[in-house]
Structure formats: C-alpha cells, structure tokens
C-alpha cells in the first residue's frame, strides 16, 4: 500500500511517500495511524494529535473509522481551508 504525506505531516515524517505492507489487524484509518505511531518518534510526532490529521483513501476524504481494505493509496494531510 502506498502512503503519501503532505505539508507539515510530510515534514515531521521526513518523507513524501512510502510503500508499506500492513500487518494483520490494520482495518481502519485509525488502526493505521496507531500502527504508524509505533514505527518511530517521527511518526509519533506527526500523528501526536490524531484528531487533527486528515486522511484520503484513493483521493476521497474519509473519517478515521473508514475501512482501508482495497485502497491503493492513503494520503495524510493537515486540515485545509478553502479560498
């Protein structure tokens, strides 16, 4: 699965994207975030406030409880404003 990071999430993680193989039991965006936080302090820092970081599955914005099965790409980004 491809993970993509934008704005300050990218800066904190230290990369723009990566390919990962998820372990069993990672079913939702929230599960994925908790798993990422366990991968190192840069991820812990990027996702320290889980309620702030937004996610998109295959370019569609989703909530943390969204199931990730079948997704090709998951993007993480800070809140955005229109203009």
Image (cartoon, helix red, strand yellow):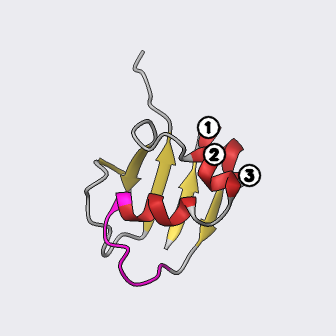
Quarter of the image where one finds residue 38: bottom right
Q: Residues within 10 Å of mark 3 (few under 14, many from 20)?
A: few
Indicate which disc, 1 or 2, sits on the residue closer to the N terminus: 1
Q: Between marks 1 and 3, how big is the CA–CA gap?
A: 11 Å
Residue at the far right in the pictured view: 14
Q: Which of the labelled discs sits on residue 74, or is there none? A: none
Q: Which of the labelled discs sits on residue 7, or is there none? A: 1
Indicate which disc, 2 or 3, sits on the residue closer to the N terminus: 3
Camera-near label (2 vs 3) is 2
Residue 26 among magenta residues? yes
Q: Which of the labelled discs sits on residue 14, or is there none? A: 3
Report the quarter where the C terminus lies. Answer: top left
| Residue at x-position 46% and y-position 60% | 34
Q: Residues within 10 Å of mark 2 (few under 14, many from 20)?
A: few
How far across and how far down the image is residue 47, in percent? 53, 47
Give the residues drawn in magenta, as a range: 22-30
């Amino acid at each position: 699965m491809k993970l993509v990071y934008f704005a300050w999430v990218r800066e904190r993680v230290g990369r723009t994207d990566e390919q990962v193989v998820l372990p069993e039991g990672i079913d939702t965006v929230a599960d994925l975030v908790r798993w990422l936080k366990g991968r190192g302090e840069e991820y812990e820092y990027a996702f320290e406030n889980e309620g702030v970081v937004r996610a998109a599955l295959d370019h569609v914005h989703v909530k943390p409880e969204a199931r990730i099965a079948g997704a090709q790409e998951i993007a993480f980004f800070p809140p955005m404003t229109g203009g």
